[in-house]
């Protein structure tokens, strides 16, 4: 998907992703077995969503913004969350009134009716329209030959004006360190989300109260994404991201040790900081490696991170079955967040390649 984005731009991918995911949702309502449901959801619905929605929009924003990249991405992520917050209750009501098959079909038709037509308004890049990113110069300081050196823990690195090729990006230690740090963060984040209700039950709450914890986490993440984006454009992203991971570590410590219900809801609110760090990850990747090959560079990183995303929830469930307790699981999550914070805090911008070695300009 990232390679296709860099080659053809966002419009074809958004159109194709909307068609694939919409048809997949319609087909999902026709499945007659659990295996068929898995194959359709993973092979069709999720593929269309990742191909033309999440990944395409993040890469498109990276093309259109440099100085305000993080804030723009945070608005996009907020809309993702808001869409889920609005649609999920309506979908639940529709399922209660009818059934999940009919609801899936309605969702598919809605996606087909909305996404492909709106994709026609998507433009490839500001340069393709005779414009510049952010509506002005590419950077505040003109052309920058290489990323500015780190001056302090809170002084942000100046985004590079050089577009790394995929091969050049893969040769930099920063790429692999950012991938590793993000894997530690996202693996724990996803696993906690999957096990949030069982963790709440283990702490003595009811399943309904556990579901409320999930809602608190989702609302906290949605309501603070823009604030994180604002901070990310004004301070060193590595520091903001590292602090977010430490807040998540503290939240898990509260989940592990707290006995009062209110403390568990505080922990759920603090865990939103890990989800919001995702905005900083992709913005930092754009700052480090530029705009021309961002789709492919991000796609490769997402593929590598997915290994951890798959393994950690499974490991958490296995450990709970062994020990009949989430204590060991939460300790592992805390170590994961701590290692991620350590890596991100010390992450430095890569040295830009020589001008003669850079890739083609943004089309």
Image (spheres, grey):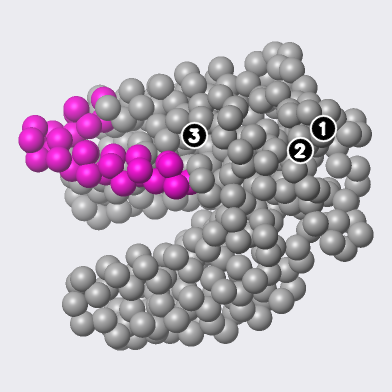
Looking at the image, residue 53 lies above or below residue 18: above
Q: Residue at x 55, y 20 (%)?
A: 345
Percent across and percent down for residue 314 are 22, 44
Tell me where the magenta segment starts and ends, as one range.
302-331
Give neighbour class at mark 1: few <14, some 14-19, many 20+ (Cα, 10 Å): few
- Element type where label 3 sits in the image: helix
Cβ atoms under marks 2 and 1 closer than 8 Å:
yes
The question of residue 1 being in magenta is answered with no
Q: Residue at label 3? A: 179
Quadrant of the image containing the N terminus: bottom right
Q: Sequence-wise, which precedes: disc 1 or disc 3?
A: 3
Q: Are marks 1 and 3 in contact (CB under 8 Å)?
A: no
How busy is the neighbourhood of tag 2: few (under 14 within 10 Å), some, or many (20 plus)?
some
Q: Which residue is mark 2?
A: 358
Residue bearing mark 1? 355
- Is residue 319 placed above or below 17 in the rendered structure? above
Distance between the alpha carbons at the discs numbered 1 and 3: 26 Å
């Amino acid at each position: 998907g990232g390679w296709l984005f860099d080659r053809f731009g966002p419009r074809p991918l958004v159109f194709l992703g909307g068609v694939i995911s919409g048809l997949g949702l319609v087909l999902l309502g026709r499945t007659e077995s659990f295996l068929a449901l898995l194959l359709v959801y993973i092979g069709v619905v999720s593929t269309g969503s990742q191909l033309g929605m999440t990944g395409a929009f993040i890469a498109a924003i990276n093309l259109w913004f440099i100085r305000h990249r993080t804030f723009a991405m945070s608005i996009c992520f907020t809309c993702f969350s808001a869409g889920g917050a609005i649609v999920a209750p309506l979908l639940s009501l529709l399922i209660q009134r009818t059934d999940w098959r009919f609801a899936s079909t309605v969702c598919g038709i809605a996606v087909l009716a909305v996404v492909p037509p709106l994709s026609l308004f998507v433009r490839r890049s500001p340069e393709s329209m005779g414009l510049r990113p952010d509506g002005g110069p590419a950077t505040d300081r003109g052309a920058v030959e290489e990323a500015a050196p780190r001056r302090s823990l809170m002084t942000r690195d100046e985004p590079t004006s050089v577009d790394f090729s995929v091969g050049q990006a893969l040769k930099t230690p920063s790429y692999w360190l950012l991938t590793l740090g993000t894997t530690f963060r996202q693996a724990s984040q996803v696993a906690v989300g999957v096990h949030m209700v069982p963790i709440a039950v283990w702490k003595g709450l009811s399943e309904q109260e556990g579901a409320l914890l999930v809602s608190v986490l989702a609302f906290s993440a949605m309501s603070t994404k823009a604030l994180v984006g604002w901070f990310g454009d004004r301070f060193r992203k590595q520091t903001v991201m590292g602090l977010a991971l430490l807040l998540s570590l503290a939240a898990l410590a509260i989940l592990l040790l707290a006995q009062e219900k209110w403390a568990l809801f505080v922990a759920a609110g603090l865990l939103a900081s890990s989800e919001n760090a995702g905005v900083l990850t992709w913005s930092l990747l754009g700052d480090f490696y530029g705009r021309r090959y961002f789709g492919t560079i991000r796609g490769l990183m997402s593929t590598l991170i997915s290994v951890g995303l798959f393994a950690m929830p499974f490991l958490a469930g296995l450990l709970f079955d062994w020990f009949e307790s989430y204590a060991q699981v939460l300790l592992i999550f805390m170590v994961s967040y701590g290692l991620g914070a350590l890596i991100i805090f010390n992450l430095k911008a890569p040295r830009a390649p020589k001008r003669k070695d850079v890739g083609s300009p943004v089309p």
